[in-house]
Each structure stands twice: as C-alpha cells, then as structure tokens.
Image (cartoon, helix red, strand yellow):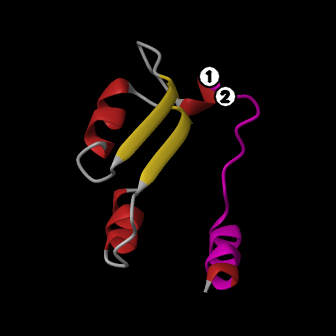
Amino acid sequence: MKVALAALRQRQPGKLIVAVPTAPPDTCDDLRDVADEVICAVTPEPFMAVGTWDRPFDQTTDDEVRDLIKQAA
C-alpha cells in the first residue's frame, strides 16, 4: 500500500485517504506517514492475521491484480 500511495502522491492529489477494515495498530500508524488521512475501522490486539478478523478473506490472485491495473489505466 505504501508503494501505491507513493505512486498516487506523484499525481499530486488534493488529499490521499487510506481506509481499511482491519489492521494492526502499528501499520495504521506507519500509513499516517504517507497518507493525509488513515481510517482503520478495527485495530485488534493481538492482531495475528487479517483473516482472523474479516470473514471471508479470500486472497487476490496476481491475474486479478493485473486485470484491475489494466482497467484503471
């Protein structure tokens, strides 16, 4: 996500907002260094894994990511 935010920042947006349903508290803190606003709905401790807190949590395939990038271009 940090790389995506850096790429978006190069386009000089008015504001970069990150919103995630679940993340470790330290990850949310780290994202505040690269985004203008960070919204983390749930920051459980101990965190363990996203799949523990979000159901269902299917992995995104490389092909799905490539298709999304092509659609966005």
Q: Is residue 59 magenta?
A: yes
Residue drawn at x 70%, y 38% is 57
* Picture quadrant of residue 26: top left
Q: Is residue 64 above or below residue 36?
A: below
Q: Position of residue 15 (x, y in %)?
A: 39, 58
* Residue 61 painted magenta: yes
Q: Which mark is residue 53?
A: 1
Q: Residues within 10 Å of mark 2 (few under 14, many from 20)?
A: few
Q: Which residues are magenta?
A: 53-70
Split into 4 quadrants, where in the image is the C terminus? bottom right
Which amino acid type corresponds to the residue marked 1 in the rendered image? Trp
Name the residue at 70% across, 81% down.
71
Q: Secondary structure at mark 2?
A: loop
Q: Secondary structure at mark 1?
A: helix
* Residue 69 on image: x %, y %: 61, 78
Image quadrant occupied by the N terminus: bottom left
- Vertical placement of residue 70 versus 37, above or below: below
Residue 11 in the image: state x and y as whole percent.
Answer: 37, 79
Out of 3 and 41, give the one closest to the viewer: 41
Looking at the picture, which amino acid does disc 2 mark? Asp
Q: Which mark is residue 15?
A: none
Seen as rendered, the residue at the extreme left is 33
User: Relative to 70, does residue 24 appear above or below in the rendering?
Assistant: above
Q: Which residue is mark 2?
A: 54
Q: Are marks 1 and 2 in contact (CB under 8 Å)?
A: yes
Residue 58 or residue 35, whichever sits in front:
35
Q: Position of residue 45 (x, y in %)?
A: 41, 12
Q: Would you call the spot at circle 1 few (<14 residues within 10 Å), some (14-19), or many (20 or more)?
A: some
